[in-house]
Image: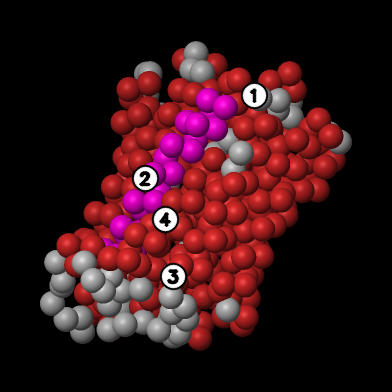
Amino acid sequence: MAGFMLDAMDVLLYVFALQAIRAEFGFSNATAGLIASATLLASSAGGILAGVAADRFGRARVLSYTILLYSVASAGSATSQGLAHLLFWRALIGLGLGGEWSAGAVLISETWPARHRGKAIGWMQSGWALGYMLAAGLSALILPRFGWRALFLAGVLPALLAAWVRRRVREPEVWLKRPPPQPYAALFRPPYARRTWLATALTTSVLFAYWGLFTWVPGFLSAPREAGGAGLDIVRTSAWVLPMQLGAFFGYISFGYLADRFGRRPVFLAYMLAAAALTPLYGLAPRIAGEGLLLAIGPLIGFFGSGYFSLFGVLLAELYPTALRGAGQGFTYNFGRGLSALAPYLIGSAADWAGAGAALACNSAFFLLGALLLRTLPDTRGQLPE
């Protein structure tokens, strides 16, 4: 949970610094979105590689290395002198982002018993909301006074956690007793091929919706009204994001408890439908009713637009045996993340010609598609193949 929290903080510092970076380098919305897309694309590669490495070298060991990577890369971002530098450093952060989730989620899935697995993943996933809030708080404190470079330098602090993980977190017993690793190609052959591609389609859909929405929320809040935004300054933008992410925090945790109690499919469907309905309303709120409606909807869109991610740490782990679990979970989630890397760029491009609020509304379709795709996968609740 702490690793995912600090991971989110390092990734999302860019989101809050986006307008300041645009002003310094003269980037368009599309170019700024391209940098965010590069982070996601690199996270796809990082997650896939870390999944394979976790099967061979250990879940906790790989987890510690990924935390160290994104910490050092965040500090490196502060030295950027243009587009190429930012692309390089943010791509390295992406490698750490994808790798941290792959190693951490499979570690928890193999450590907790079946009846509590959803709850445990929900608590781990809630670290993302805490990291989002931490990034918002640091941005409000540092960005107006010291600028975006100082903000990125603060991202080196998670390196301290890497040392603690390396010393104190043990490998799961099921991994220590694992059979010989299976070849990576087994993911794409029977009996796993169909579930691999269907799970990848599911993660692609909801990750596209998530990154298309939440990458641009701070930019939407701080964009001028004539550009379709809410016209808030950076301090008020951070203040509006905090209740949204508080809603996300409870959404992650609640999903785990509700899914363990009532089943994953009905709970996931409810979250998807609510997110699809709230997204266009949020994007159009400044035109409809102003800041009050934005503030009221924020916690709800955080709750329903984020909380469903607690499904994936559990579901994807249960689709594969121990010797292939890291690779399978790493591929299905992170290949989908790689495809979703187009979302910030496409939504940024849409914002350039249609306005920020209207561009956000486009993400609803992908929430609805995710609701349909879950039904194509087997219900593996309570299972963890050896």
Which residue type does callout 4 highlight?
Ala
Q: CA distance from mark 2 to mark 3?
A: 21 Å
Residue situated in front as seen by the camera: 45 or 253: 45
Residue 386 seen from this side:
yes
Which residue type does callout 3 highlight?
Leu
- Range of magenta residues: 326-350
Q: CA distance from mark 4 to mark 3?
A: 11 Å
The answer to which of marks 2 and 3 sits earlier in the sequence is 2
Question: Residue 296: horizontal and vertical position, in percent?
Answer: 80, 48
Query: Which residue position holds label 3?
Result: 377
Helix, strand, or loop for circle 3?
Answer: loop
Vertical position of residue 133 compared to residue 221: above or below: below
Query: Which residue position holds label 1?
Result: 354
Badge 1 local density, few (<14 within 10 Å), some, or many (20+)? some
The disc label shown at residue 201, or none: 4
The answer to which of marks 2 and 4 sits earlier in the sequence is 4
